[in-house]
Image: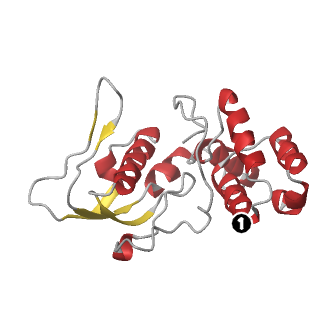
Amino acid sequence: LMARKENDIRHFDAEGCFTGGPDMEEDVGDAACQTFSFTNPGGRYKLQLARPYHRAMLRMLCKTAERYKVPWEKCMSDLNYSLPERLSVSKNATTKIWQAPTAGDLSFNFSLESQIEAKWSSLEEDDFVGFLQKHFEFTRFKPSLNKVVPLCNKWAELNGRSLDQEVFIQALAKDFNMSVAYVQYLCKAAPSMEADVIN
């Protein structure tokens, strides 16, 4: 989120967030540790829309469908909503922010496989390099130039907190398209993590 050009966030506190789990005092059941993957958003989701994090996840999925130029309804199947009214998710024409319900439990399967297959249909069957290049260009996130400094500052701030650094690196490796210069900086800023960065 911080790496997006249109977002004004330049810093966030990530201390102790390496587990990815909720507060131990919260009773959230099966919906506890769901995470959003920019590269591979497909899967089964169980959202409690009274929770801000789950509403944010729903908005991210709608943005993903929008990026693929597909209505969000077509990406969701086996949808169940606990409230009697029809699920209403829409984008505000003025703020460009997706509006999500603030109550009810929502479960669904999210898939973009048919859209991805259609995008790569022009490639030759044996063009593996071309496939990987197109796949990474489209499915991985390239940080905006004006957000590279805050992103690198966050990495430097985590120096000495190995568990937090490992999670940070895993997120970059999974969802980001990083240039060689960025990788070189990550190694220089945290020499003890050089092997993890390169691997």
Residue at the far front in the pictured view:
25
- Assess disc 1: are there few (<14), some (14-19) or many (≥20) residues with their C-alpha within 10 Å of its C-alpha: some
What residue do we see at 45% from left, 66% from top?
34
Q: As rendered, which of 172 and 62 lies closer to the eye?
A: 172
Report whether 176 appears left or right of 87: right
Nearer to the camera, 90 or 138: 90
Residue 3: image location, x then y, percent? 61, 38
> Residue 107 location in percent, x, y?
29, 65
The residue type indicated by label 1 comes to Leu
Where residue 194 sits in the image (x, y, percent)?
88, 57
Residue at left 45%, top 68%? 23
Q: Quadrant of the C terminus?
A: bottom right
Up/down of 88 relative to 146, above or below: below
* Residue 47 versus residue 2 in the image, above or below: below
Q: Is residue 186 above or below residue 82?
A: above
Question: Callout 1: helix, strand or loop?
Answer: helix
Q: Quadrant of residue 198?
A: bottom right
Q: Quadrant of the N terminus?
A: top right
Q: How many callouts does the rendering have?
A: 1
For the point 73% across and 59% down, the residue is 165
Residue annotated with mark 1: 163
Q: Residue at x 40, y 73 (%)?
A: 25
**In this rendering, is residue 27 above or below 11?**
below
Outermost residue, left side: 84
